[in-house]
Structures are given as C-alpha cells and as structure tokens.
Image (spheres, coloured by chain):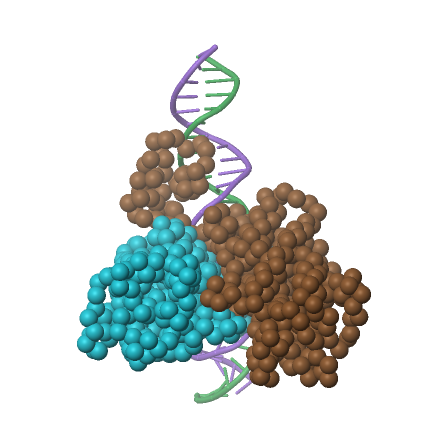
Chain colours: A cyan, B brown, C green, D purple
Amino acid sequence: MTSIYDIAKQAGVSAATVSRVINNERYVSLKTQEKVQRVLQDTGFIPNANASSLTKKRTNTFAVVVPDLTNPFFTEIIHGIEGQAAARKIAVIVSNTDENIDKERKALRFLTERRVDALIIASAARSGDHIISCLGEDTPIVLLDRQPQGLKADLVRSDDHRGAEILVDYLVGLGHRKIGFIAGKRGISTTKLRLDGYRLALEKYGLECQAELIAQGDFKKEGGREGMLALLALPNPPTSVIASNNLEAIGALSAIREMGLRVPEDLSLVCFDDIELASLVYPFLTVVAQPVRTMGAVAAQLALERLDGKAEQPREVVMQMTLLERRSAGRV
Amino acid sequence: MTSIYDIAKQAGVSAATVSRVINNERYVSLKTQEKVQRVLQDTGFIPNANASSLTKKRTNTFAVVVPDLTNPFFTEIIHGIEGQAAARKIAVIVSNTDENIDKERKALRFLTERRVDALIIASAARSGDHIISCLGEDTPIVLLDRQPQGLKADLVRSDDHRGAEILVDYLVGLGHRKIGFIAGKRGISTTKLRLDGYRLALEKYGLECQAELIAQGDFKKEGGREGMLALLALPNPPTSVIASNNLEAIGALSAIREMGLRVPEDLSLVCFDDIELASLVYPFLTVVAQPVRTMGAVAAQLALERLDGKAEQPREVVMQMTLLERRSAGRV
DNA sequence: TCAGGATGACAAGCATTTATGACATTGCAA
DNA sequence: TTGCAATGTCATAAATGCTTGTCATCCTGA
C-alpha cells in the first residue's frame, strides 16, 4: 500500500509535513502545501484512517445496536443517526440483536474491539451491567427508547406514559370500557412505562384494570399474535386492544383475522409506533407515533456533544407522542 | 490504554505470545496459554482491532452503500447482510446516498479511507467509474440491484425483465389493454430492464406501446406522484399503471387520491418491490416481490468468497420475482 | 550425543500523529 | 544597522497497539 512516506518522498518533504498538509494544520508554508497537494492529487492518494485513529485515539465511528432491523421504528432511527454522522465524517456500524441478550453481548464485545467512539443502543437487556463492563466508563453511551436498569447514560425516548394515556383517552372517547392491553417484552423499561400509563389512564376514568385483560407480548409479531389470541379466548373479551408496538399490532391483526373477526367492526385495535409506509399505502392502523427520524438525529447529537466534552450529567430527552387517527378503531 | 504489552508483563511472557494466545495460534504451550488466558480474564482486556488490522491488512469491515434508507427494500437487504457479516465477525458500515451521486462519491472516499474489505453497493450513478477510481481494483465490489455501466463486478439482482412481464401478464389477464408505466430513475440499469420488459410484454400481446403512457419517475414517492399525475392528465388515460418500485407506487397512490379516484375501481395500480409490513397491516398493493433478505445474504456471501480468494470472473446472481396478488388491481 | 521439533523472545513492520528541536525568518527596539 | 525575541517551517524520532519472521533455546526420542 502506498503511504504518506511515498508521498513525502515524491514531494521531497518529510512524512510529518505530508500529515500536516492532509490535516490542514498550521506551520506549513503555502509553497510546500501546494507541492504536497499536487503529489496528493497526482497519485490519488487516500490516507489510512485506521492508522490515524491509532495515534489520534478517535475512530470516528459510532456503533448503533438495535434489537430488530425489521422494524421501521429502528431503521428510521438509524436513518436519522446516519444523516448526522455522515455530515461529521463519522461511520455508523449497525448491529442487530434480534432481542437476544447473548447476541447483544457479543456485539458489544465486538464493537469495543473496534474502539467505537460512542454507542447508541436500544438494549434488549433488563439491566445495563454488561454494557459498562464491556465498554468501560469512558465511551459515551446514548440509550435509545429503552433504559436498562443501573445504567446512567444519555437517553432519548418518547413519553410512553403519556402515549398510553392518549390511546386510552381515545378509546374511551369512542365508548370503549373494556380495553385490553398486549404488553411489550418483559423487563424493558418501555414495556413498564406503557403498561403503567395504561393502568393509570383507566383509573382516571374509574375503569377497573383487570389482570386478565393484560396479555404478554414481546414487541414482535408472534408475541402480538399470541397475546391477542389469549385475549380473544377470554369468556368476556375486550372490545378494544392496545398493542405495545407496531409489530405486535400486526401479529394481533393476524390473530384477529384467524378468528374470523374484523377490525374495527368486531374489535378495535390501536398501538404504539407508526409504520409510515403502511399508512401511506392504506391508512389503517390508528397509532401514537414517535418522531423517529428526529430521535435518531438527537441521539447522534448527544453522542457528538459527549465527544466534544460538553455535558456532564446524563441527559434525558423526552419526545412527544402524536395520535394518528385512522381506521382501526371504531365506536362501540 | 492497556495493551497486550501490559498483559505480557503481568503474565511474564512477551507480547508476541499474548498475541498468539489471543489469536489461537500454534506454538504456545498449554501452560502458558492458561497463564495468559487467566490474566486476560482477570483484567477483562479487549484487544484493539484497529491496530490489528494495520498489520493484518484486513479491517473485517464491509461497507454497504444504499440510495434510500427509507425504503424497506434496502433496509431488508442490509438486514440480510448484517446477519451474515455478524456471524463472521465482520462489521457493517452503512451509508445512505439519497440517490445523490455527490453523496455517493463522498461516501466512497470516506469508506476507502477506512480500508473496508469489501463494498456492497446499490449505486445511484449511471456509470461505475467513480467507484473503481476510488476503491481501486483490489477491493471486492458486489453490486446490488443495479449495475452501473463499465463496472465489472459481482452482481445480485432479480429478474427485472421477467418481473415486468409478470405484471403485464397479470394486468392483461384482468382485461387491461391500456397499461401505463412509471419508469424508474434515469440511467439506472434496473430502470431500463423493467421498462424493456414492459415494452416486450406489451408487444407479446400485440399491444401498442405508446410513448405517452410512459411517465418518468425516480424511485421515490415524489417521482411516482408526478408520474401518475402526468398519466392522469392524458386525454385518454390508462386503465392500469405499473410503478417501477414500491415508493413510486405510494406516490402514485397519493396522486390518484388527490384526483378523487379510487384504486382499483377507477384505476389499477401494481408495482415492483413489496412493502411486507404494509401488506400485513392491510393487504392492498399487488406487486412483484424480490427475495430481499436472501439477496442481502447472497451479496455478503459473494463478498466473503472474494475475500477468501475464491472466484475469479465476475458472477451474476439473478433471483426470481414473485407475484403477490392483493387488491390494487381489478378487472376492467 | 544429536537431530529436529516445540516454544517463545526480539525486533521489524504496519500507516499514521506529534513532541522536540534545529534552523530560518520577521519585527522591533536600541 | 544590529541584536534579540518571537514566530514560522520542517525533519527526526518516538509513539500508537498489534502481528510475524527470525532465531535462540529447550526438550524429546533415537
């Protein structure tokens, strides 16, 4: 491989000078700058960023770890992150964990081997111990959507609690009194917040929160499907159901159809997190949506600020949830 | 930072030995292996992969460059690539170009600075000159979906030509004789293949291929919308339209609705590339779909084989298109 | 005793950055 | 005009954290 030494030789200067020219540093005369630049141009030389990061102790790389690359919620966030990162000449490595803690652990190990400058993660884990024990205290961490226990780090999320309330308000407004809930994956902060929000909102209306109306999900289609089947098997099933995320809603939908029921005629279904493209094709699911792309951008910003040494205390950015009313819920 | 030298000191061996233990190489006795492993464990040392790649001349990194991170077609492909890569301990850097050649150029430069081991790219460009001139001849390149001119490299795509034929067959089968077409982005191989397929299929049925029935698109929503508006403005508009990809179809849909028309009652609409989640929410768009996840996996495989020195000639993997009949097209 | 393989240390290399210091230039006061 | 400090310009060399070829040493078995 050709290195700055080759350039240096051709230009009749030292490698150090070439390095200075490349990095636009002071203390190199215009004349030598031009001389070196010419050789750089002529040879089409492209410096090795890896070698550079060895000495600079900056890899200009962010790691993004998400639990489900299949979910537009996360891919949109990645989109947002990539946009910010590219503008700062920072590479984005993405890792998918499939909601699997073991995969997450491996990914983290792998990413710290590469000495990423920052980690942006929607963790599949209940607690964050494995994250710090792997990355150490020094690498900036930005939590996305989910806050593992015992992990003090920047956090970007939406107001899950309020989101649940918005959905309950909406359903109650349509006359529903028996509102089912398909919870998210066990042990995830988001799951708890959304469930709590649901409970409190019911209380607000003096509605009893029956345990049997709460089914367990996992933020995936299959979990949503099974959760919904459980609710439908109830002797006295709910007239409306809230799914804890978009994929659960899709699973729930398939369960409902399996049972030969229609939405919203026989049952209302709403959920967290939008699937924008789906609604553009055919506006169907009523949801509370998060400003996903922005969340990604903000997460990247937080990481960048940490790198610049700004900020000390962990920061928490909470975004608004927005109700997008479509056709999956009806008056009862 | 702690390095293998520190480990070596603690274990009472040389750094070379530590390196050998870490990389599981021969010529280190079981006893010293254990001794070193213990220190490795105790200190929780994680080697620096960047330093390693400096000597090994392998970064264990793939670059994936796509034109639209918003399109599930590409995110699913990324998903497929990531799966294969993670299994081989290869990092995936993703770059989004927004169909912008300048962004693509910048991304390529950036990625070669990082000396990625392979490039997997769905290029936004007509020709591939900028790719080789940047990466050089040595880095394996796998083309995804699109084949820029003058670029000899492995290619993973689907049978676009046949895909178009399938759609025309289907529409003709429904009685359509006036079939419009919203083309893809100019200068992209896929655009041409799909258009050619459409033309030839019409010919097969002795249908005249009218130039006015072909609108220009760009593989994005806006292009689809404008293309459809143009078709609808025709004195004698088509009874059915084929959009060159999923996003164009969405744009077309919005145009149709703007004009107060209904699909499929007033107009049939079909397109290339599925939006799986959308169809699960509500089965609407009839499409020819590509096996996206597999395509990503195959692309990664091709890259891996190149790295292993297998394969000499450029290979072309062509996947089958599948018609997914739903509700956006009706009998005329 | 000796051949030959196993073991591991040494040192060079990978492509950069950067501290240090040598030398040149400039500005300004004497 | 001279002297001197401040600054600019650049090369040398050390450092970054790891790998690997070379070579000396130690064992083993014949």
Which of A167/B99 is in front? A167
Quarter of the rendering containing residue A164: bottom left
x and y percent of residue B218 in the render? Answer: 64, 73
Q: Is residue B107 visible?
A: no
A155 vs C5, left or right, is: left
Q: At x 68% / y 60%, what residue is drawn?
A: B166
Quarter of the rendering containing residue D16: bottom left
Q: At x 65% / y 51%, what residue is drawn?
A: B317
Q: Quadrant of the C terminus of chain A?
A: bottom left
Quarter of the rendering containing residue A46: bottom right
Which of A279/A53 is in front? A279
x and y percent of residue A229 in the render? Answer: 34, 58
Which of A316/A35 is in front? A316
x and y percent of residue A42 in the render? Answer: 69, 65
Q: Is residue B263 visible?
A: yes
Which of D5/B50 is in front? B50
Q: At x 37% / y 66%, what residue is drawn?
A: A245
x and y percent of residue A115 in the render? Answer: 41, 57
